[in-house]
Amino acid sequence: MITRFAPSPTGPLHLGHAYSAMLAHDMARERGGRFLLRIEDIDRSRSRPEWEALIFEDLRWLGLDWETPVMRQSERLSAYRAALEDLWRRGLLFACTCNRRDVLEAVAAPHEGTPVFGPDGVVYPGTCRVRKAATVEAPVPDGVALRLDMAMAVSEAGDCSFVETGRIAGGGEERVGVRAWEAVEQIGDVVLARKDMGTSYHLSVVLDDSAQGVTDVIRGEDLFEATKIHVILQRLLDLPTPRYHHHQLIRDEAGKRLAKRDDARSVRSFREAGHSAQDVRRMVGL
Ligand code: GLU
């Protein structure tokens, strides 16, 4: 078993991250497996070396150890680019010049009906997809976003499903199917390369989990729908699909999920208040 924790160095780790990291670490250790760490720093405008340093410090304080060298997404841009070129040549991508406002205006048009919200926000109305046919022969364009043509993707991907181990009490497994029409209507043409990054969370996470040989992805249940995108990408790119363990989210007293800016529940604040790693384990129910 190979598990991983993949934080973005864009703020302090909170109890929810601690739970995810400790769970992934414990699962690997219990099975004599390996636990890896990956720094998801593709968002250069929000990633900071000081947050990365704090992540290492917090995880060490929590009693975790991981293999080195640690993978950094900012060092993997050529791998992401190669996958984009492959998908582009196969006609599965299209260039998109819409900004957030264009998308919102297009979905608000009277004939569009009620906007549907998917894992990445409002489902893309397809504005730039109509221009696609003319662009496939050209090289992959720079400086624009690249979206996945989801209808084409699901028809090429064929049967998509994954094994889920996190949602059945007692550790049972279930197979979750990814329905083609749901992917088209409820996820839509997701961005695989952001204009400012040359990649996206979805593409990078899929390529990296595969490059690191991750067998079990442990992540919060807020990413359950996003996992369907990942499985479709794995089929398209001929990569293995790991098992997925979507765990419950750690919430505050009001039932709200924790956010990066929620400094009161940061691992550092518990550490500085004199708590122990065992206290943190108890707080998150481990
Ligand atoms: N960097 C992502 C996060 O912090 C990783 C989530 C995942 O794929 O497990 O939410």
Image (spheres, helix red, strand yellow):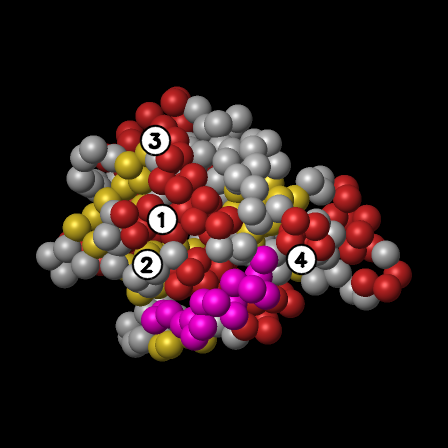
Say whether mark 4 is within 8 Å of ligand 1.
no
User: Which residue type carries mark 2?
Assistant: Leu
Q: Is the residue marked by circle 3 packed among few (<14), some (14-19), or many (20+) residues within 10 Å?
A: few
Asked if disc 4 and disc 3 are in contact, CB closer than 8 Å, the reply is: no
> CA separation, marks 4 and 3?
30 Å
In the picture shown, does residue 278 fall above or below 33?
above
Q: Residue at x 80, y 52 (%)?
A: 106
Residue contact at pointers 1 and 3, CB within 8 angstroms: no
Mark 3 and mark 2: Cα distance apart in space: 20 Å
Q: Disc 3 or 2, which lies upstream in sequence?
A: 3
Dot 1 crowding, Cα within 10 Å, few <14, some 14–19, many 20+ = many
- State the SS at label 3: helix
Answer whether labels 1 and 2 touch (C-beta < 8 Å): yes
Give the residue number, with chain letter if any, for mark 4.
123
Q: Earlier in the sequence, mark 4 or mark 2?
A: 4
Q: Position of residue 254 (x, y in %)?
A: 58, 53
Foreground disc of the pair 4, 2 = 2
Tell me, for residue 207, which label it has, or none. 1
Q: Can you identify the residue that label 3 sits on?
A: 75
Q: Amino acid at mark 1?
A: Leu
Nearest to N terminus: mark 4 or mark 1:
4
| Magenta residue span | 149-164
The disc, 1 or 3, on the residue closer to the chain's N-terminal end is 3
Please give the name of the residue rendered at 30% of the width and 61% of the height, measured from the top-left corner.
240
Circle 2 residue: 239
Q: Nearer the viewer, mark 4 or mark 1?
A: 1
Query: Is residue 219 inside the magenta stretch?
Result: no
Tell me how far mark 1 sits from mark 3, CA to CA.
13 Å
